[in-house]
Image (cartoon, rainbow, N blue to C red):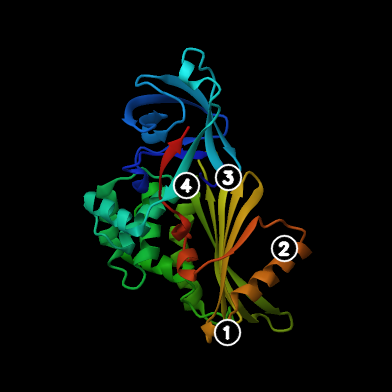
Amino acid sequence: MTSSGAVSIQSARLSQMGVNRQVLKEGSSVLVRVIAERGNGKYEGSVAGVRVQLSSSKNLRAGDAFTATISVKNGSIVVTPKDVSGMPGLQGSGEIALQFNEVSQTQLFSLLEALGLPADNLSSSILQSFKQMGLKMDSALANKIRSLALRFAGKEKSAAEILSLLSQKGLEADENEIMELLALLEGDERSGDESGTGQNKNKDEGKKSKEKLINRINLIEGSWYLLPFELIQLDFEGGLNGSHCLGSGCIRLLFDSLKQLKLLNLACRYNNQKYLFSLSYEGRKITNTYFNVCDLENPEKINPEEQLGRLKKHFMAADLNPGKLFWSEKEVLEGNASGLESFVAFGGDI
């Protein structure tokens, strides 16, 4: 199920890759067809043209077909037959429940190899970025992005996300532009220091250069928008030259094809701590909030349960509903938080 509440129907063989992906929203109609009987109440069938394995307490026949409606009940995906008057075996059978199973890393790696991609975490990250942005799986493009991302030692995953975004928006950028953008987005510049923001013109000029690529990205409608920011403490007596930067970060907004907000990611460095949040939306409501807090000087200092309690209190004080709250590892949430994307295959029971 997608974050927007739609049902993602994929083939059992290629669902992990995002290939032949068809998104069906609540109430969508699908064609269910029985292809063959496999014995012991097991059948091969198709839902929305995708082959699945079915089991049924009713006697079915190869060739049986009917139209059904997609819905979500108690966290399960179900299809409900609309008219089975010509199929005596299905009378009174009610709903067909589809069970989704997250694939293992071993299964994912075997499919990466089948597509000509090295079976490693970088290849997996590239496919997660494709899935997150709704890009069609293209093994040639994935290999190209991988080769380019390897040039950014230590920042391969972040570079792959940026390269995927550039491809999605039809943009090109040279290696220096991407390196500068990564430095800006990941806060490699000094923050929280004592230097005045108006005292270093070279820094300002360098920042403007880095922001050129961001402006090109944000000018093209759809997918991700990148909004870097700084937390500035103003010294009103000394003017801008007396102010200094307390922290910096970036807000990333992902919109779906219907121009609805799908994800809001926030990364911020402040007071020697790094904060990461990823909020998923359905309509205007937050459904899930993933977060991580890391002490940059003493990582062991942070207690996840304590941070979870504090965050709940902040949401309550602001009268906001965060949906379900989850602590997540920072490697998953960094960048576009594409690490939250999973790949599934499914079977079904009638």
Nearer to us: label 2 or label 3: 3
Nearer to us: label 4 or label 1: 1
- Amino acid type shown at disc 3: Gly
Kindly report the distance in space between the C-alpha atoms of the residues bearing marks 2 and 1: 23 Å
Using the image, determine if residue 290 lies above or below residue 201: above
Q: From where the camera sits, is residue 173 visible?
A: no
Nearer to us: label 2 or label 4: 2
Left/right placement of residue 164 relative to residue 248 reads: left
Kindly report the distance in space between the C-alpha atoms of the residues bearing marks 4 and 3: 36 Å
Pointer 4 local density, CA inside 10 Å: few below 14, some 14–19, many at least 20: few
Look at mark 4 in the image and give the residue it sits on: 220
Nearer to us: label 4 or label 3: 3
Look at mark 1 in the image and give the residue it sits on: 301
The local secondary structure at tag 4 comes to: loop
The spot of residue 311 in percent (x, y) is 68, 68
Q: Are marks 4 and 1 in contact (CB under 8 Å)?
A: no
Left/right placement of residue 95 relative to residue 216 reads: right
Q: Are marks 3 and 1 in contact (CB under 8 Å)?
A: no
Q: Nearer the viewer, residue 213 or 86?
A: 86
Pointer 1 local density, CA inside 10 Å: few below 14, some 14–19, many at least 20: few
Q: Are marks 2 and 3 in contact (CB under 8 Å)?
A: no
The spot of residue 3 in percent (x, y) is 54, 47
For residue 40, what is the image quadrant?
top left
Look at mark 2 in the image and give the residue it sits on: 315
Using the image, determine if residue 89 lies above or below residue 55: above
Q: Nearer the viewer, residue 271 or 85?
A: 85
The local secondary structure at tag 3 comes to: loop
- Decide which of tag 2 and tag 1 comes sooner along the chain: 1
